[in-house]
Amino acid sequence: MKGGQVLAKILKMEGTDFVAHYPFVPVTGELLDEGIRVITTRHERTAVAMADAYTRLSMGHKNGVAMCQSGWGAHNILGALGQAFDDLSPMLMIPCGHRMRQLDKRVWDSTKNFECTTKWSARLDSVERVSALMRIAYTRLRTGRPSPVLLELMGNVLSGELPDSDFSYEPVVGWKYQADPRDIEIAARALLRAKAPVLYIGDGVLRADAASELMEFVELVKVPVITSIKGKSAFPENHHLSAGMRGRAQWMCLGRADLVFGIGTSLSGSFSAPVPPGKNIILCNIGEYDVNLYHKVKHAVLGDAKLVLRQLIEEVKNQTNGSGRKINEKLEEEIAREKELQLNEWMPKLTSSEMPINPYRVIWDMMQTFDRKNLFITHESGNPREQLTAIWESIVPGSYLGWGHTTNLGFSWGATMAAKLMWPKKLCVNWVGDAAMGHNSVEIETALRENLPILTVVSNNSGYAVYSTRETSRLPEAINKKVVSPSSVISYAAMAESLGCYGERVIEPDEIIPALKRGIKEVKAGRPALIEVITSFEVDRISSRIPA
């Protein structure tokens, strides 16, 4: 077997569904021969985004794979791989490398250059070592604190040959571990004794595929739940104990809490609720790295979120003779009241008839139009992220993908195509601004070419993100005039049409829902669609911070 055949065979054995790449990698034929789909994107960054998102959406069951060319190709993956690293995505990155004899010259060395954005990096330097190195890679991908792994595919491997009789490989299962029973006992007792505890949930619950265990635990301990941006959707936000990710209910629960019980989160507060000073904290996480990293932790429980939650459920039952905590009807009423007050406060924006259209009206109309039980949605960074995360109510695990520790504009196209690969029958949507349209928006052509019909909804205020009234006042008068005159604004709907996709521009508020329905119809027919809405400069946001 040639080296490329060895690599492709191992990837197939490890359950690889597809490899995303740009613009060409020398093992394409070998991958296709093994039945692995090869997806060619328009930029290396999107290929990495697809592998990253697919890994996260699989909830611990798949490791996405991306490839790129050597040198200049590897230059282009740095931002995307950095995002995967900060978001703890255990994807496999395989950049092509030079021949071993060239390493003494001034060439791009991926193993060294990506040490800061990977859990482990090494060279596939000979065909004889491919099996051993791939075994190490998948062990590290599937065990312990998750992060990307990089293997640089050297030219020597592609030209090398391995006798069929010498090939030996078995898929790596990976190892997960429970927590120390004593730690579980202490954590459960503290939670039961607390007068006003709150559960703070991160994406470690989603990565461990532990949403059902979380629901069982919450119903047992009857404690309000808030989430981080990456943990959003781990717990249904229409549940009577959900305090959401931002806003009044979250402020109330977190502000009065005498115990913050974190599960699968670092409690960094990045684009999420920061933990107020002086709170008692118990942190349940996959490893020691996040303990005492952002906050002083009173007690830590180390282990896989699914296994730890199962241990906590049994321990709470043991300490309460199976009854759990008593229902706090007053607290549940207060959460419901704060949610209602929040909705009433924002309803004028959610139902606004102003022109240009308020972006919150677009989000609200999307919520009224889409079947949220059969949906995936994500956003771009900046205002689209701030607006969607505050208003959108996620009710199914994995139906929303949050990101933001390191943000690359354009990530949502790769993420949404990955979701369509994961769930072909779901409506997969990305909510973007006009700034993000300058980054990777041509990937809608990739969606068409690869038969991945996604729906993109663009909030086009023709002035990029706006974060404050002060910033709005400094915008050039010409930009403000463009917003008032949609005919002078660049047409992204026309761009989509020119690429062979469905495109439609919306100017009047009453046309949002009909346009969305036409977009859904096109997507169901197999064509990617882009609905462009001419929006206003909306500067108001629902803060994740407790008001002073």
Image (cartoon, rainbow, N blue to C red):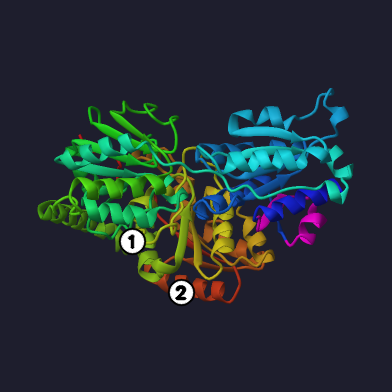
The x and y percentages for residue 242 are 26, 53
The magenta region covers 16-35
Of tags 1 and 2, the one toward the viewer is 2
Which amino acid is tagged 1? Glu
Which amino acid is tagged 2? Lys
Task: Please state, as top left, top right, bottom left or bottom right, where the C terminus lies in the image.
Answer: top left
Side of 77 relative to 492 (left or right): right
Residue under the image location 30 percent in, 30 percent down:
299
Q: Nearer the viewer, residue 545 or 498?
A: 545
Q: Callout 2 environment at 10 Å: few (<14), some (14 to 19), or many (20+)?
A: some
The x and y percentages for residue 25 are 79, 48
Residue under the image location 63 percent in, 36 percent down:
78
Side of 331 relative to 366 (left or right): left
Q: Which residue is mark 2?
A: 517
Q: Which residue is mark 1?
A: 354
Q: Is residue 349 visible?
A: yes
Corner quadrant of residue 130: top right
